[in-house]
Image (cartoon, grey):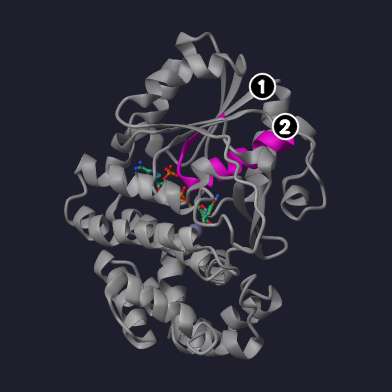
Amino acid sequence: MKNNFTAFNPTKLHFGRGVVGELGSQAALLGSRALVVYGGGSVLRNGSLQDTRDQLNQNDIDITEFSGIKPNPLTEDVNRAARLGREMKVDLVVAVGGGSVIDSAKIIAICIADGCDAWKVMKGIHGPTGALPLIAVLTLAATGTEMNAVAVLQNPETMEKIGYRNDLMYPVHSFLDPQYTLSVPLNYTAYGIVDLVAHSLEAWFGGGDASLSDRFVVAIIREAMQYGPSLMKDPDNYELRARIMWAATNALNNVTLYGRESGDWGVHALGHVLSFLYDTPHGATLSIMYPAWMKTMRERAGDRITYLGKELFGFQSVEETIKAFENLFSSLGSPITCPEASIDASKREEILSLMNRNRAGGINYRLSDGERAELLSHVF
Ligand code: NZQ
Ligand code: ZN
């Protein structure tokens, strides 16, 4: 335990069937005029939006709605939502949806409070002084945004998709009812499982020495290995949905990171280039990039890959470990090559050029242009 750290997570997380029944009374303690943010309409079909509206109405909270947040969310939508929120003088933000909606709502809550531009916040040009309180109703198990202080947005003008972290962005309350995730289609169910595994791996390949955090990583990936494939075969199973949902929260709520110098996040940065260019779903970018990253890093990160393989699969070699991850992702139905995600080999130069321009790589393992080129040779 060489590194000092501060353990902190202020989000009050409510988990299980019917927990949204507590939303209204909690919201009433935080505000009286809510901006309710959601995406393209899945929340209308699975009941989560109506349950949230009912809760707010029953507690005399005025509602203004902003819909249309897209997967791989855009800063321009965040700015539009924040302008609406300021016009309507809202004092509370309620996000209903997956990671894209909740991430957007985190920055909306800052921009309403500060009257600032979303991208300036993301780039660290504007240091926020405050944020409206945020309540999240999660409908998709994947990102961990429901219990962390991170948001990821993309900006077509600068050709970037980037993450930003600030303690102001922890949701005050997050409501996780696995019933709302029963309607998640199979492809996004798989991408969510890949995402939670990838978050665990980004922690594993971070710098520093943190044995307990390492054990949390192994335990979380084991949950995904045990319940992920079963869930793909039985997507209406509440119990399996619940196990994956809780695993996803824990994969990125700080417990895997305490005591480390950092996570790595290189594979996320590489994957964001695919999302930016081709709107590839986040989890799909990770199942493509992680095995390729491990192949490229077999020398530099060989000890860590082998150690993980031994803990998870009982293997002794880098190659067997990488193969096991490929098998896991493929068994879920998530792509492990670009062509499997409908990105053909003619796109290779375009991808490499944006990866190099954005210096896509990790905090612990920085990548050279040559390594990025090698990595792409593994995905086509
Ligand atoms: O837009 P709607 O109609 O709501 O449909 C969504 C969307 O099409 C749909 N969906 C959500 N809940 C559903 C549902 N469909 C049926 N039933 C439900 N219950 O699923 C699609 C994907 O939604 P999205 O929110 O984009 O997915 P996810 O939760 O995987 O979020 C991905 C975003 O989060 C970022 C990613 O980069 C990406 O932009 N991340 C955020 C992180 C964080 N804040 O900590 C960390 C992650 O590494 C990740 O980068
Ligand atoms: Zn992720």
Residue 70 place in picture, x, y as percent: 52, 48
Which residue is rendered at x = 49% and y = 56% of the image?
256
Question: Relative to 352, is 264 above or below?
Answer: above
Q: Is residue 223 left or right of residue 274?
A: left
Q: Residue at x 47, y 87 (%)?
A: 298
Under circle 2, the secondary element is helix
Q: Mark 1 near mark 2, Cβ–Cβ under 8 Å?
A: yes
What is the count of numbered marks? 2
- To which residue does mark 2 refer? 112
Please tell me which of labels 1 and 2 falls first in the chain: 1
Q: Judge left or right: residue 4 versus residue 327.
A: right
Quadrant occupied by the N terminus: bottom right
Q: Amino acid at mark 2?
A: Ile
Query: How would you rate the neighbour count of disc 1 (Cα within 10 Å): few for under 14, some for 14-19, many for 20 or more?
Result: many
For the record, the magenta segment spans 94-111
Q: Quadrant of the C terminus?
A: bottom left
Find out whether residue 59 is within the magenta segment.
no
Residue type for callout 1:
Val
Residue at the spot 48% in from the left edge and 40% down from the top edge: 39
Indicate the position of residue 324 as horizontal and vertical percent values. Answer: 30, 77
Most foreground residue, 306 or 124:
306
Which secondary structure is most common in the magenta stretch? helix
- Position of residue 175 relative to residue 116, above or below, is above
Q: Which residue is mark 1?
A: 90
Inspect this view and state whether residue 267 appears.
yes
Q: Identify which residue, 368 or 216, lies in the foreground.
A: 216
- Residue at (35, 86) in percent of width and height: 317
- Determine the CA span between mark 1 and mark 2: 8 Å
On screen, 18 above or below 214? above
